[in-house]
Image: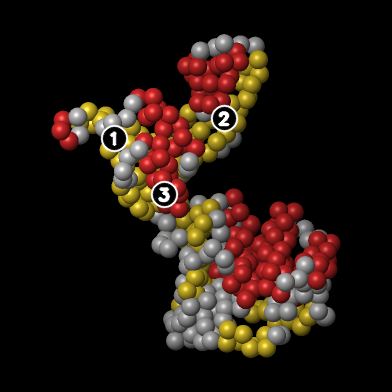
Amino acid sequence: MIMVIDPQNAGIAGNMLVGAMIDLGVRKEEVQDIMEYYASFFGEINVDIGKTSKSGITATYVDVKCQDAEPIKYEELRGRLNSITHESVTPEMLELANNIFKTLAEAESSVHGISLDKVHFHEVGAADAVADVMGAVYCFHQLQLHTQKTYGMPVALGGGRVESSHGPISVPAPATLEILKGVPTFGGPVDFELTTPTGAALLKNMVDQFLSYYPMLVNQKVGYGAGRRDLSFPNTLRVLTGDAPLGSDKVSVLETNLDNISGEVLGHSFSNLLEAGALDVTIIPTLNKKNRPGHLLRVITRPEDSATVSEAIIRETGTLGVRILPYVHRNIAERKIIPIEMDIAGEVTQINIKVGLIGEEIISIAPEYEDAKVISAKTGVPLKNVMKQASEEFKRILDEQAII
């Protein structure tokens, strides 16, 4: 299963994310209990959760009303949070919550030029933030999303100016911008804040990869979390869960024709290009102009590495030009590396097995070549025998226990 968090319509705030995940099926009574319990250690708190409509879209609205007992430093907040126990909150949940608050604190530290131990949450009320963060973390784990891949879409920020403890500032707030470094964002379409620092920190810590378009998935559930304002468009955050029969990513394909290069240089270039960042290198015999035999060198690389790898191709082969096919889409099966132990020639050794999956179906099993080569050299067992025995041992273990 995968999750998509889509803040393109109206940005993201903590209570919107909580509402969207409750909409996916988490029991609201449990979430309300977690939010009120943890936040009560930081101030007076009241949480109401119910259905509402935003421009015709039915959504879950989480209304958090609170009054902080006193200003609190980040270090004190962290210490107090870690001292609280609740039977439904696991150490993994608390670790994620700590990471989210650390993201907020580091953003404030960077913006104001102070150390973490001096950070106060000026723009984020402690009780409000604790309620949102603990509610969102609890939902995230209840839906088992912490074990799956989460994608994020570009983030709507809003615009205009808002009041802060330092006076009027333009939207997005400096802390929000700091947190969302490296994340695709866009301004508007309203003159107020759509994405809050807490919402940004939740997004940054829960999302594995940001995309411009939805990934390939078989949609199973859609949840909507409502914002407070009534706008001329649905003030909602959309969250989806579904199955991904195949993953997808983007690569660049680099090509050049070679007709004046020795086999020794070509072989040496192969290894050096992999070290330079190539994901795969293929050399294909060709018949070039003037009927001269040659080779087509084709390299797959990440788009951000294409310039570096192109230069490496030119330096290694002496070619005068490299064709670049940027942003080629490829579908990919899920891959897992699973270490196993096996007895070979009387010696217990470990080898990694690369497993290809579509959903829960295993489509390929391949012992790692480099591991097998080391074992072969160490034991004197032929490489093909090492790889055969590793495959058979993996299948035996798979029949006896669930290791995937």
Q: Where residue 179 sits: x, y (%)?
A: 61, 67
The Cα–Cα distance between marks 3 and 2, rounded to whole angstroms, is 29 Å
Name the residue: 56% across, 25% down: 371
Q: Give the residue number, with chain letter if any, for mark 3.
A: 306
Specify the label residue 258 is tagged with: 1
SS label for mark 2: strand
Q: Residue at x 55, y 79 (%)?
A: 194
Q: Nearer the viewer, residue 305 or 244?
A: 305
Report x, y in % for residue 110: 69, 69
Task: Give the number of the mark in front: 1 or 3.
Answer: 1
- CA gap between label 1 and label 2 equals 36 Å
Mark sitting on residue 352: 2
Q: In the rendered structure, find residue 374 and report the number of the disc placed on it.
A: none
Q: What's the residue at 33%, 36% (across, down)? A: 297
Which amino acid type is marked by label 2? Answer: Asn
Looking at the image, which is closer to me, 105 or 140?
A: 105
Q: Earlier in the sequence, mark 3 or mark 2?
A: 3
